[in-house]
Image (cartoon, rainbow, N blue to C red):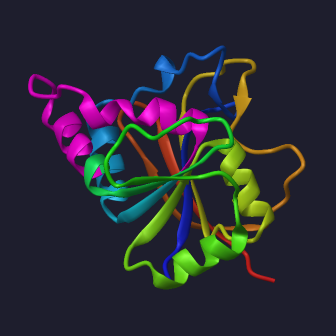
Amino acid sequence: MARLVYLTICSLDGYVERDGHFEWAAPDEQVHAFVNERERAAGTHLYGRRMYETMVAWETMDVADEPPVMREYAEIWRAADKVVFSRTLGEVRSARTRLEREFDPAAIEELKRSAEAELTVGGPGLAAEAMRAGLVDEVAVILVPVLVGGGTPAFSADLRLDLELLEQRRFDNGMAYLRYGVAQG
């Protein structure tokens, strides 16, 4: 069975964006290369509407003059399947993407059973739904050494999960990667 991983980049005080801004979370080349390796393992990305609307830029972004890590990420993103969960999005604007109007835990469980590569869930709202349903196997966080004082939290305040540290890594720019397994039982 494939694992479902919630991977997020957030401020040290736990936010993924503030007032629509997240430039403070932009990875440098070392972190971007690491993210590329993590994302290469994913065959399918599950997105909520807002996260999809942010990420879909990779579908058509002209990366010809960008650094190699950005060109590589665009290839990785375009090659993966995407499932967008939204009641309001009119249509998807990327290849290998399907739109689902409702989050169905049983369908995600079946997707995990049939997938040949890991799945990721992107966006804190959808991730919280998946965590509440007991579908998330790992939580991976890249912490940015900045305090933003508010915004969209990476984790829902009404959620409790017991986690086991599986991996940690410090980057030269002060960012830190923490990967946790979700305790079963």
119 to 123, vertically: above or below: below
Instruction: Say which of 114 and 90 sits in front.
Output: 90
Q: Residue furthest front?
A: 90
Asked which quadrant contains residue 18, the reply is: top right
Residue visible at 26% across and 55% down? 79
Q: Is residue 115 above or below residue 57?
A: below
Residue 100 sits in quarter: bottom right
The x, y position of residue 31, in whole percent, is 34, 40
Residue 20 visible in rendering: yes
For the question of whether residue 141 can be seen, the reply is no
Q: Is residue 143 magenta?
A: no
Q: Position of residue 73 (x, y in %)?
A: 26, 43
Is residue 65 magenta-colored?
A: yes
- Left of 116 or right of it: where is 69? left
Q: Nearer the viewer, residue 93 or 114?
A: 93
Viewed as shown, does residue 35 lie left or right of 165? Answer: left
The part of the chain drawn in magenta is 47-76
Q: Position of residue 106 (x, y in %)?
A: 69, 76
Q: Residue at x 20, y 39 (%)?
A: 69
Q: Quadrant of residue 42?
A: bottom left
Q: Classify the position of the C terminus by image quarter.
A: bottom right
Vertical relation: 70 (above or below) 176: above
Most common SS among magenta residues? helix
Q: Residue at left 30%, top 59%?
A: 40
